[in-house]
Amino acid sequence: MTTSGSSDRPERGTERQNWVERRREKIRAEIDRNRRGEYTVPTWVLALALVLIVGGWLALIFLA
């Protein structure tokens, strides 16, 4: 037997608000880490930079 109005689950608005609050807290924590100098470059940015550098060298070698 199932009931549509279960009191165990929070309302949708409350769940959404909690998600927003958690997201804001993560952003605040990241900003605090960056201000303390704990900033790190994401791995995908480093990989992209490496690909561009290697691609540039290969272009110079083969096109020059």
Image (cartoon, rainbow, N blue to C red):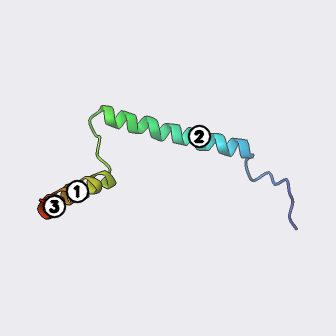
Across and down, in percent, residue 47 comes to: 28, 57
Image quadrant containing the N terminus? bottom right
Residue 28's place in the image compared with 16, above or below, is: above
Across and down, in percent, residue 9 comes to: 74, 52
| Point 46% across, 41% down: residue | 26
Q: Which residue is mark 1?
A: 50
- For residue 38, which quarter of the picture? top left
Label 1 amino acid? Leu
Pointer 2 or 1: first along the chain: 2
Residue 18's place in the image compared with 64, above or below, is: above
Q: Which residue is mark 3?
A: 63
Q: Which residue is mark 2?
A: 20
Separation (CA) of disc 2 from disc 3? 51 Å
Across and down, in percent, residue 41 comes to: 29, 46
Label 2 amino acid? Val
Secondary structure beneath label 2: helix
| Point 26% across, 35% down: residue | 37
Secondary structure beneath label 1: helix
Image quadrant containing the C terminus? bottom left
